[in-house]
Amino acid sequence: MISFRRGIVRSANLAFARLFGVARAQVVGCPLRELLTRLSFAPDDISALLTTPPNQGADMDVVRIAGGTASQDLRVRRFSIDGEGARALEALAFVDETSRRATQRSTEVLVEELLRADRQAALGEMAMALAHEINQPLGAIVNFAGAARRSLMGRAVRVGELEEVLINIGAEAARAGDVIKSLRSFLKGSPQSSAAACVNAAVTVVLGFAGPAMREQSVDFRLQLAADLPPVQGDQIILQQIILNLVTNAIQAMGAQPLGQRHLDIHTLRESASNVRVDVLDTGIGLPKELGERIFEPFITTKANGSGLGLSIARTLAQRLGGAIEAAAQPGEGTRFTIRLPCRGEDETPDA
């Protein structure tokens, strides 16, 4: 910490000298602007520190390039010690946050990598079914192209007939491309340009991912999407991952059930003026009473081959969006997972 009056440094403590590698005798009596310049503070930061009125109680984040190469993250606060006006004795307090912020950035990178791995794992379990889904439009393209070739070789072809075949080929190619594009965007976790997420759209995309797996597992589903939902605050990719984790969990939970008893229900509704709600209900193995809320803890699972991370990550992501997830046992067998998310605002366009 240093104190100053009328722009001249009056004192500097030992911690300041150690932080910046200077001798206190070289600091006292030095013009404050000259000192900060000598310590490699940016001109804009110096201006802000010298013009900020005292007693604001607000910290300023400053990045100092020490020695011309290494950066130093500092938290700086200006405050008044004694007096008022031109004769006021003021102070600048400096806190070195370089290590803490570096650790925070590393943690954020690890979290993002974990989330990406979770997305890949969730879709990896559906890879064969998704390959089948992409193979359908590709097979249709081959069939349409073969039909066009046979028509051209066998007889005179009307222009309109050939045009219809080409339109069908283009449509099937576009459908395959859309599936691939959607998967790439989800796996990459590309940030969305808007801060609003559409719940119904997220449910629809997830069912596109999970649909082939549900057909292979003979899971039937019922969908009830409210027509008047406002957008929720958050990222569309994160919302999709939350719902996909719950749907994947439901499919896995119903694997041991007899055919004809595997039912998945997804409901969306506006629960209140400020909340949107999503319910995911399955008829799987159910929620053991002894687990309760512990089902959301990492590595807690009711499935023999489960990782125990899907539900934990889903709750973490929901909390990142300002929402929450809860689980409750269904009458008989099965589980209901409920997601609650805050609306973005009343002036937004509702989901379609």
Image (tube, helix red, strand yellow):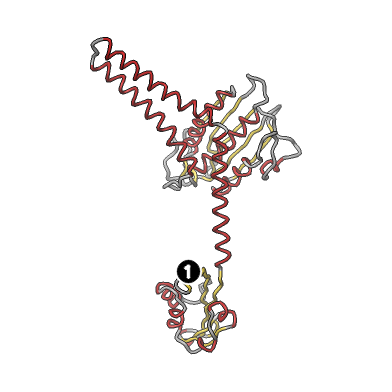
Looking at this view, name the residue that lies furthest to the top. Answer: 155
Instruction: Write the residue at 54% across / 39% down.
Output: 120
* Residue farthest right in this picture: 290
Q: Looking at the image, which residue sits at the far front? A: 153
Q: Residue at x 30, y 22 (%)?
A: 166
**Residue 283 image position (x, y, % from top left):** 65, 27
Q: The N terminus is located in which quarter?
A: bottom right
| Position of residue 256 measured from the top left corner of the image (x, y, whole percent) | 68, 25
Q: Measured from the top left, where is residue 298 in percent x and y? A: 67, 45
Tell how many labels: 1
Identified at 69% across, 38% down, the residue is 301
Look at the image and tell me in which quarter the C terminus lies: top left
Quadrant hosting residue 155: top left
In the image, residue 78 sits, relative to residue 215, either above or below, namely below
The image shows residue 223, relative to residue 290, as above or below, that is above
- Residue beneath disc 1: 63
- Can you see residue 46? yes
Residue 6 visible in the current orientation = no
Could you tell me which secondary element the residue under label 1 belongs to?
Answer: strand
Foreground pick, 73 / 284: 73
Front residue of 54/256: it is 256
65 in relation to 268, above or below: below
Residue type at numbered disc 1: Val
Asked if residue 152 lies left or right of residue 280, the reply is left
Residue 226 in picture, x, y percent from top left: 50, 33
Q: Residues within 10 Å of mark 1 (few under 14, many from 20)?
A: some
